[in-house]
Image (tube, helix red, strand yellow):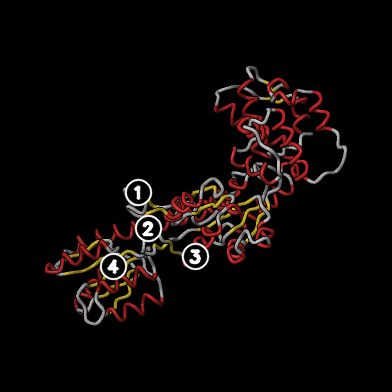
Amino acid sequence: MRRGKILIVEDELIARENLDHVLKKEGYDTVAVESGVLAFKALEKQEFDLVMTDLKMQQVDGLQVLERTKELSPDTEVIMITGFATVSTAVEAMQKGAYHYLPKPYKIDEMRILVAKAMEKRSLRQEVTELKRQVQSQKKVPFLVGKSPKIELLKQTIEQIAPADATVLILGETGTGKELVAKAIHHLSPRSENRFLAINCGAFSEELLANELFGHEREAFTGARGVKKGLLEAASGGTILLDEIGDMPTSMQVKLLRVLQDKTLMRVGGTNEIPVDIRVLAATNKDLKGEVEQGNFRQDLYYRINVVTLHVPTLAERQDDIPLLCRHFLGKFAEAQDKKIDRISDEVMDVLLHYEFPGNIRELENIMERAVTLCNGSVIEMQHLPLDFQQPIFQVQRYQRRELNTLEANEKEYIAWVVKQVNGNKTKAAEILGIDRVSLWRKLKRFDLNGGS
């Protein structure tokens, strides 16, 4: 049985032949060359499990062979063969990626053990890599609950684009699950073992957003006592989601464009460019193309982030998923609260199926969390829903379709109605709508509605 392929690089003829002979007897496939130059050629032709190279050689020495090996095949192990006078250099080689060093003169048994351990490490690494590949190939999208045609198409698209490193623009109304889509892309990507970070670009002032994304140097501003890495730098190797990118200030758009183009950033107050390796995902509920036409969003940045576009459907567009989502949230919150609730009454389900959900999935999730919290039995009943769901006038208004309004018009009408019901209390209105206060403020501004407290 093949035990592995070894490249021997030794300029002394007798030493090279002896090493080659012993390793062949051990069952290894060997290639023996007399110089670093010939080692380069051998490495370019085929991949080896292990390279054993003399450290001191003419023209190309062992350190150069090590560097070239790791460049062509990072998982190939390297053992440095060295005289006692150069052991310190061999230790330096280990710091650069060599597996170990073998001091001359060495004992044959010592060499056999060292080679066997290096080959075992190589074999284990290959097994782990293969297992990861198999797991990656079997991964599905675990974050998106639903079986409706639009969600199934979205899942298929995510699985198709996730392995690529392209920038993705995720479009959808507030509460549709844009961040879950971003997490699914990251989960199925080669970057899945690294960090996923998200930041809401509309929740910070320009100065705070710059500090959060790019970090700062010591004494960059009053109170900056030390160096701080920004999210772009902290996510290096992984994925970052720029949520509500349509609300990003123009000056920040210029800085982000430079990061996407050059793969480098500069901290606030800094002068050195820092390389970053990140996949950028962007999300917004705005019509970015319209924002570009109005001069509110940079055209060059729009084309840079719009390599692939995903549209996340509203809950109204996927009503068939409401029962499935209800059961999902019921199980989630019942387990979290240690309750044995196993059913939703037909009346409750009927009300939810006829409701328009302007707050989308986030609103449904909040409704189910409230219901589970208030339920002391095993069935979710009408009294466990928010009070406005229990009012006959509310239900009649929701069931009857007096006219076919646009989704935006319905959203505006409902937000105005909710704000009125809570006497202008924005905090309470945001809670009922299933959105945060900042998002509600933006919607009130966009719809030209007067807010309250």
Label 2 and label 1: CA atoms lie apart by: 10 Å
Look at the numbered disc 1 and give the secondary structure of its residue: loop
Residue 224 is left or right of residue 168, and the answer is left
* Residue, disc 4: 25
Decide: is 286 above or below 38.
Answer: above
Decide: is 61 above or below 353.
Answer: below
* Residue, disc 2: 269
The amino acid beneath tag 3 is Arg
Name the N-terminal-most of marks 1 and 3.
Answer: 1
Q: For the residue carrying disc 4, how many other residues have a C-alpha within 10 Å: few (<14), some (14-19), or many (20+)? A: few
CB atoms of marks 1 and 3 within 8 Å: no
Residue appearing at x 71%, y 28% in the figure? 421
Name the N-terminal-most of marks 2 and 1.
Answer: 1
User: What is the quadrant of residue 216 in the picture?
Assistant: bottom left
Name the N-terminal-most of marks 4 and 1.
Answer: 4
Name the N-terminal-most of marks 2 and 3.
Answer: 3
Label 4 and label 1: CA atoms lie apart by: 64 Å
